[in-house]
Image (spheres, rainbow, N blue to C red):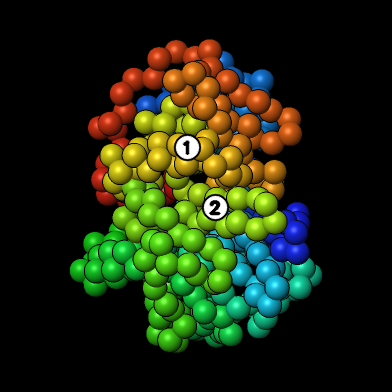
């Protein structure tokens, strides 16, 4: 599935591997009561939550920026034929490469692959299978990753402590490094000629958001800072996969302050569509507009959410639900 919009002479394209209700609400957002979602069902259904199964709707995707002489991918989704613990990501088979070719971004024409972080559902199409090997999918591209994430993941891989993230690191990241295509960046260093990374630690230690300004618009590709628009109302609720909980909460609040100040369009990594989210101040919190159909109050009519500061473990447990 493909969707696109223009910012002047730059085209933004969403290549969707799949979208649908995947994760149980209370498993994915520990500490978020079902009643908070029930109170906001009028705008959460069906794009962000399915009430009958109590599951969050997630999108796995590859984002393409076609900017003058550059074809830039922002994260690369799950990828085909990868062995994964998550049943939603294990050994999937989608025509992503055909879709990329259809929008003028075939693998050999991609110039940059920019990662917000190194979790498996953001690096999958970095490689594809060639016989019994995983080889770079985009052989002429520069692959770019946050230096802090690489250092952390590589160290944990070398010591056997990377856990559920080791498989994706081995089949999708290490082959790029071994091919000499991987480069590293620090927050504040412009990448691919048009993206400015900002430190966004918490989900991983080196996660970044990516800021893009063009034709009077400001977009922020917000990685996994937000998994649900309800986290705008309840910023202390982390996702199951946030490895550094306190940092994740601080990052989320900082992103909302930045967006509310700059009026940027936010593109969460697992949200469907290219309308983006608009976050504005309202009262002592924030309101989120998730597209042309909704304008959500900053403090919805929902029960008090208990303190969640000690709910999510620092290291993600071995589990098949991710």
- Residue at image location 70% in from the left, 73% down from the top: 68
- Residue at image location 44% in from the left, 13% down from the top: 303
Left or right of residue 92: residue 197:
left
Crowdedness of circle 2 by 10 Å Cα count: few (<14), some, many (20+)?
Answer: many
Give the camera-side residue of 58 and 244. Answer: 244
Quadrant for residue 31, please give it: top left
- 10 vs 226: above or below: below
As drawn, the label of residue 221 is: 2
Going by the picture, which residue comes out furthest to the left? 159
| Distance between mark 2 and mark 1 Cα atoms | 13 Å
Q: Is residue 70 something that shows in the picture?
A: yes
- 288 vs 75: above or below: above
Crowdedness of circle 1 by 10 Å Cα count: few (<14), some, many (20+)?
Answer: many
* Of pointers 2 and 1, the one earlier in the residue sequence: 2
Q: Locate the N terminus by quadrant.
A: bottom right
User: Residue tagged by mark 1?
Assistant: 256
Q: Position of residue 14 (x, y in %)?
A: 68, 56
């Amino acid at each position: 599935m493909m969707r696109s919009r223009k910012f002047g002479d730059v085209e933004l394209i969403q290549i969707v591997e799949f979208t649908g209700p995947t994760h149980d609400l209370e498993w994915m957002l520990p500490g978020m009561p079902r009643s908070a979602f029930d109170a906001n069902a009028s705008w959460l259904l069906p794009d962000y939550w399915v009430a009958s199964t109590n599951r969050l709707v997630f999108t796995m995707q590859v984002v393409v920026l076609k900017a003058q002489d550059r074809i830039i991918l922002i994260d690369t989704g799950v990828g085909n034929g990868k062995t994964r613990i998550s049943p939603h990501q294990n050994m999937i088979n989608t025509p992503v490469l055909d879709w990329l070719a259809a929008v003028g971004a075939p693998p050999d024409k991609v110039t940059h692959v920019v990662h917000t972080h190194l979790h498996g559902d953001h690096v999958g199409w970095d490689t594809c299978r060639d016989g019994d090997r995983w080889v770079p999918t985009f052989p002429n591209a520069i692959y770019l990753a946050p230096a802090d994430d690489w250092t952390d993941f590589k160290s944990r891989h070398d010591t056997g402590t990377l856990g559920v993230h080791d498989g994706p690191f081995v089949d999708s990241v290490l082959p790029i490094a071994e091919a000499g295509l991987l480069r590293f960046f620090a927050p504040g260093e412009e990448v691919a000629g048009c993206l400015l990374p900002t430190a966004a630690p918490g989900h991983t230690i080196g996660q970044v958001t990516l800021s893009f300004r063009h034709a009077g618009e400001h977009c922020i590709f917000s990685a996994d800072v937000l998994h649900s628009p309800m986290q705008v109302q309840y910023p202390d609720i982390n996702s199951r996969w946030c490895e550094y909980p306190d940092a994740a909460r601080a990052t989320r609040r900082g992103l909302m302050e930045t967006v509310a100040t700059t009026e940027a369009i936010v593109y969460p990594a697992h949200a469907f569509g290219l309308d983006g989210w608009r976050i504005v101040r309202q009262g002592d919190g924030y309101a989120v507009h998730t597209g042309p159909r909704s304008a959500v109050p900053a403090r919805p009519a929902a029960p008090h959410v208990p303190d969640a500061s000690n709910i999510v473990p620092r290291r993600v447990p071995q589990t098949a639900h991710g």
